[in-house]
Amino acid sequence: MLSIGSVVLGVSDVSRATAFWTAALGYVPREEPSDDWVVLVPGEKAGPGVQLALGLSESPMQERPRVHLDLYVDDAAEQAAEIDRLVSLGAHRVDWDLYPQDPDFVVLADPDGNRFCVIDATHGSDSV
């Protein structure tokens, strides 16, 4: 049976990407990072999650990537707070022209330009 072991992001600076994603997710390096590769795993406070590998890449960032990360939060207030926190760590908002009306997500990019979304998991639900 197959299972996903890691999600891999191509980055132009492994050290910078490691600093961003460890601070963003509470992950830690599985072993000592090299200049061209690191595997991050959930730290003690991060809870369960999939590994995130960062590999040195010379490929240009895609304007509309085919694969991206979705990061979930519990409500709109947490979404706003996490977006502010991630921006303070080096992420930036992406001017995304494909937003639907009343979106549940905000598109950001890490310092390397890799797109990811912060999603309000309760958006549109009837529960309060």
Image (cartoon, rainbow, N blue to C red):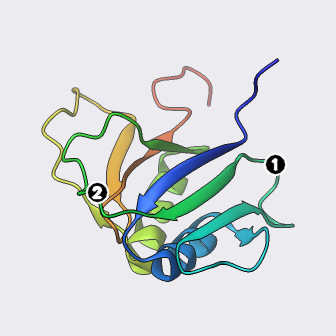
Q: Amino acid at mark 2?
A: Ser
- Secondary structure state at the residue bearing disc 1: loop
Q: Which labelled disc corresponds to residue 81?
A: none
| Residue occupying the point 82% across, 54% down | 47
Q: Nearer the viewer, residue 110 or 31?
A: 31
Residue 31 screen position, x and y as percent: 79, 73
| Residue occupying the point 56% across, 75% down | 18
* Left or right: 55 as drawn, with respect to 100: right
Q: Which labelled disc corresponds to residue 48?
A: 1
- Secondary structure state at the residue bearing disc 2: loop
Indicate the quadrant where residue 86 lies. Answer: bottom left
Indicate the quadrant where residue 19 lies. Answer: bottom right
- Determine which residue is flagged by label 2: 59
Indicate the quadrant where residue 40 lies. Answer: bottom right
Q: From mark 1 to mark 2, how far is it between C-alphas? A: 30 Å
Residue 41 screen position, x and y as percent: 75, 60
The relative height of residue 77 versus residue 81 in the rendered view (above or below) is above
Q: Amino acid at mark 1?
A: Pro
Locate the C terminus and report the quarter of the image it occupies.
Answer: top right
How dense is the environment of label 1, judged by Cα within 10 Å: few (below 14), some, or many (20 and up)?
A: few
| Residue occupying the point 47% across, 41% down | 119
| Residue occupying the point 29% across, 40% down | 65
Whether residues under marks 1 and 2 lie with C-beta atoms below 8 angstroms apart, the answer is no
- Name the residue at the right extreme: 44
* Left or right: 32 as drawn, with respect to 81: right
Locate the N terminus and report the quarter of the image it occupies.
Answer: top right
Q: How many marks can you see?
A: 2
The relative height of residue 36 versus residue 60 in the rendered view (above or below) is below
How dense is the environment of label 2, judged by Cα within 10 Å: few (below 14), some, or many (20 and up)?
A: few
Q: Nearer the viewer, residue 79 or 36?
A: 36
Compare marks 1 and 2 and give the one earlier in the sequence. Answer: 1
